């Protein structure tokens, strides 16, 4: 990187993001500990999990995109791929930020405060006994136990970090050596890595998100998380590229044709997300099996036939997270006009976060005074949700800034760089 002003700007941005991130994370940790004495001690941990899942989904989506471009030998996104590679540096930090979700419950003597099945003595909602006596848990206990959980988490992050490390290393090395073999190695790794990443991300979504309610069954949950991650990643990288191209870092390289193609991919994955979300609901609705339908029931009514807050969120996901972006992205101008594209990208990211709320927050909270022995956790945006999102985001932005100083703004010696720079619609 030759421009000293760019270096200073990146350094100052990274330092500012790090300071804000650490302060916000400290606030989130305070929220976790201060909430332990409340009637719902898991809510503070869910705030942290929401923040982690938001940034993890973006990182995983970018890792998927990078490998897909390699496998299909896509030439047009070469300059965009470098920006994705910078964000792939966040996985080691996300691993460190995942650890408190497991360690803090062990420290306070309540390992099952978030994932109930981590403590077999936890009461089941409705006074139906304890977890270890639950027949559904007993069938799943070989998979759902502390040692297996830790081992799998380490394996998942090893896959994420390992794939990111080699893809970044070979790409950055090409800037120095110009060796085309680095590109060939990245393509070969990606052809295998896509399957490894698909498996790891699917099982991670099951372990960390779906098992919050271990009674539930769904074979499409991992695909939902993939579709949601791709939408979030495309929106995030579009905003990032537009910002750095306007501020000089990529000025003159990120063009209308690149925006158009990324916009087309956003439209495709908007449709795919809707298809997967509807298919999961439709299959469970038709099968009408109580072990499956209750997951949707608690996202509709409070157990007494009265619509709860999640009913409105469900409608928002249908109309605001699918219909509106779908209609907007059908228009050509939306995919090329910067202001419109930024609006749609921010819109999708906002409702992606709402989608994560809808999937992670609802649950049965034990309450002896309630008629059924529990109440349904309702939609609410807590202050510690915001601090977790900002805190983890600050660490991610700091990591991206550090990575930006280690490589050229675009892969100048990549064999496909001219095709990307001269890309046209």
Image (cartoon, helix red, strand yellow):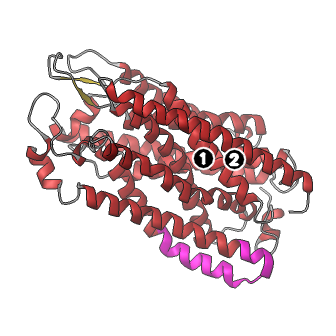
From the viewer's perspective, tell me whether residue 181 is left or right of residue 423: left
181 in the magenta segment: yes
Q: Is residue 421 visible?
A: yes
Q: Quadrant of the C terminus?
A: bottom right
| Residue 315, quarter of the rendered image | top left
Tell me if residue 132 comes above or below residue 385 in the rendering: below
Tell me if residue 411 comes above or below residue 338 in the rendering: below
Q: Quadrant of the N terminus?
A: bottom right
Q: Position of residue 141 (x, y in %)?
A: 17, 55
Other residues around mark 1 within 10 Å, as few (<14) / some (14–19) / many (≥20)? many
Q: Which residue is mark 2?
A: 238
Foreground of the two, 134 or 313: 134
Foreground of the two, 111 or 353: 111
Q: Position of residue 164 (x, y in %)?
A: 57, 66
From the viewer's perspective, tell me whether residue 141 is left or right of residue 331: left
Q: Which residue is mark 1?
A: 266
Whether the residues at callouts 2 and 1 have beta carbons within 8 Å, the answer is yes
Q: Position of residue 355 (x, y in %)?
A: 45, 36
């Amino acid at each position: 990187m030759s421009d000293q002003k760019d270096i200073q700007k990146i350094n100052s941005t990274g330092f500012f993001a790090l300071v804000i991130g650490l302060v916000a994370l400290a606030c989130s940790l305070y929220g976790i500990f201060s909430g332990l004495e409340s009637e719902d001690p898991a809510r503070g941990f869910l705030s942290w999990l929401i923040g982690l899942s938001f940034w993890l989904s973006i990182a995983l989506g970018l890792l998927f995109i990078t490998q897909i471009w390699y496998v299909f030998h896509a030439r047009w996104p070469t300059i965009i791929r470098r920006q994705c590679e910078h964000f792939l540096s966040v996985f080691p930090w996300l691993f460190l930020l995942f650890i408190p979700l497991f360690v803090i419950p062990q420290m306070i003597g309540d390992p099952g405060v978030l994932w109930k099945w981590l403590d077999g003595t936890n009461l089941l909602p409705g006074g139906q006994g304890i977890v270890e006596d639950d027949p559904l848990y007993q069938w799943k206990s070989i998979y759902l136990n502390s040692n297996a959980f830790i081992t799998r988490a380490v394996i998942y992050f090893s896959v994420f970090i390992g794939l990111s490390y080699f893809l970044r290393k070979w790409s950055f090395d090409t800037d120095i050596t110009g060796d085309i073999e680095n590109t060939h190695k990245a393509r070969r790794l990606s052809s295998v890595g896509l399957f490894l990443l698909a498996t790891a991300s699917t099982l991670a979504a099951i372990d960390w998100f779906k098992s919050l309610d271990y009674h539930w069954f769904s074979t499409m949950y991992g695909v939902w998380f993939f579709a949601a991650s791709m939408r979030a990643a495309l929106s995030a990288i579009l905003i990032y590229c537009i910002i750095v191209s306007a501020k000089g870092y990529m000025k003159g390289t990120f063009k209308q044709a690149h925006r158009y193609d990324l916009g087309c991919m956003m439209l495709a994955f908007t449709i795919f997300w809707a298809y997967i979300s509807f298919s999961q609901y439709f299959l469970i609705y038709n099968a009408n099996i109580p072990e499956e339908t209750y997951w949707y029931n608690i996202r509709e009514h409070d157990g007494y036939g009265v619509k709860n807050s999640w009913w409105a969120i469900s409608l928002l996901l249908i109309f605001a997270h699918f219909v509106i972006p779908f209609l907007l992205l059908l228009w050509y101008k939306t995919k090329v006009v910067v202001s419109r594209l930024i609006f749609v990208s921010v819109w999708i990211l906002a409702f992606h976060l709402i989608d994560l709320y809808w999937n992670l927050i609802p649950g049965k909270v034990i309450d002896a005074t309630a008629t059924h022995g529990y109440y349904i956790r309702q939609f609410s945006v807590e202050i510690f949700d915001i601090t977790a999102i900002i805190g983890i985001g600050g660490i991610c932005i700091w990591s991206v800034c550090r990575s930006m100083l280690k490589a050229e703004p675009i892969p100048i010696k990549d064999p496909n760089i001219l095709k990307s720079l001269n890309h046209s619609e």
